[in-house]
Image (tube, helix red, strand yellow):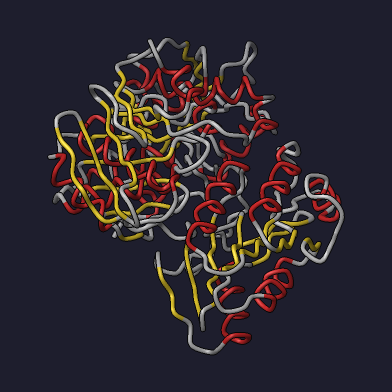
Amino acid sequence: MYSSEEKMFGKGLCMILLCELLKNWPCLAAGGNIRTEIHGVTDHSAEVIPGSLFIARNGKASRGADHIPEAIRKGAVAVVTDIPDPPDLPATVASISVPDAADFLAYACSAFHGHPSEELTVIAVTGTNGKTTVTHFIGQIMKEAGIKTAVLGTLGLWIDGKKTDYPLPPLTTVPPAHFHRALRYCADAGVTHVALEASSLGLEGGRLRHCRIRQGIFLNIGKDHYGEHGGKEAYLKAKALLLKLADGMIVNKDDPAVLGLCEGTVPLRTFGGTPGGPDHFWICEAGDRNWIAGWEGGEAALRASVDGRHNRLNAAAAFAAAVSAGLDPLKCAGTLERLRLPPGRMQEISRNGVRVVIDYAHTPDALEAVLEALVRTVSGRVITVFGCGGDRDKEKRPEMGEIAAFYSSSVWVTSDNPRSEDPELIIRDIFSGIGEETARYHAEPDRDAAIRKAIEEAAPGDVVLIAGKGHESGQTAAGVTRAFSDEEAAGRHLGRIHGSRLEETGADPVQSADGIWYDGGEME
């Protein structure tokens, strides 16, 4: 068992002298004791414990300097700033000025925990869609090869295919204090490889700085988080930061935008859906639920383990990562037949011929990929339930409405996470890409009611897609997050309407016993 300090800051060193943290860093120090013991490093005053180094970093919504008094009250023994005129501190508290507080935060967190990434093979995956699936596919392939692997991202921390109860903030890419602590936990647990999700917001915020990334993977570029970055170009620039952090990259040869960003930057390997040249890994279709996996000098025929072109490409990316990490390609190809999607990704519940599929698809590309896969496998109609999140990416709403209408026999437009926006206005934006309400297209702001009505409409042979929230166990509206699970709602209504015993396929059900409610705030 860990102490409260170890739970907050990790097992690792748990103590380092301030002078050791500063000796390789350009800085000016005044006051305090340069040889004082540091028992924690954080940029959140709420996480300060006695003996902490508090880094007063400016965020998007607050000034770090405003939180210095609270940090000192809670026991901070040193404060780091990067502002021209740092505030006066008590004589017993060291005041340290650095050129870039965010950069120093990442370095100090890594150093405090003994630079754990140097002990691990870290694989970082970025892209608009598919990061969670690819990291979990990598974990599954590595496990079958006998390699103890951790997966870190949207769904928390998993080791050898099992979710841990390790506490992490509900973000795709967690802040440095939590990130390097988690890497130390993994290294101390005997993990040798880590597959992690690198979100655009995490990359732009410097959360992965001072982490040794042996291999980066760039999956695709779609439309998401433009507003939070200040436009498409800023979003692409954020994604491209992984190129500067990784020793080498594996990129999607089928995505011209990805290739355009990556070519000529770092050593590249590629993956895709068709055969290619050297250093290329591919998986193509070969008839009904059959794949051919190929690599330079070989190929293998296998049964498809997941549906959809997008998941075939996700499998190809994971295959490329595993072989690049030194695994035998033929053995890896055999493992592809046993891949399972993570929770909330094409997660299926069925009863009496009615299928309900729950998927995290919340971008135009992701929604189209899932619907395209379902249309190819369904014998009856496709009924889609979806909405769009509030306070971001308004331009994608009509596009997603148009996609849902094109592929679906019936569409129920509902609420996702409205946040501070009026759900009716979000629905109106979506309908601008569909047209007027008709017998095929319905508006129902209450998500539970929309799920119920869609399932009531379904008949044997039909599939109901509930898109947008996937694994999430909460819904945020008007500043309040309440417990809500698409899986729970679907299971409840499907059981009541179409029978009491449910048959579940795909990933294990998501449970919210950890009490964390995901509002999709930074998850990509």
40, above or below 331, in the image: above
Taking the spot 38% from the left edge, 10% from the top edge, the residue there is 264
How far across and down, in percent of the image, does residue 502 sit? 48, 82
The percent coordinates of residue 262 (x first, y second) are 42, 18
Task: Quadrant for residue 179, please give it.
Answer: top left
Farthest residue, direction bottom: 500
Q: Residue at x 50, y 76 (%)?
A: 350
Q: Position of residue 218 (x, y in %)?
A: 42, 30
- The reply, left or right, for residue 383 in relation to residue 279 is right
Q: Is residue 104 above or below residue 51?
A: above
Residue drawn 62% across and 26% down? 58
The quadrant of the image that shows the N terminus is bottom left
Residue appearing at x 43%, y 75% in the figure: 504
Decide: is 465 above or below 198.
Answer: below
Relative to 515, say whether 122 is above or below. Answer: above
**Does residue 160 appear to the left or right of 259 in the view shown?**
left
Q: Position of residue 353 (x, y in %)?
A: 51, 79
Considering the image in quadrants, where does the C terminus appear?
A: top right
Quarter of the image where one finds residue 226: top right
In this view, the residue in front, 16 or 435, is: 435
Nearest to the observer: residue 524 or residue 442: 442
Q: Can residue 79 be seen from the camera position used here?
A: no
- 108 vs 58, left or right, is left
Label total for image: 0
Q: Is residue 35 visible?
A: yes
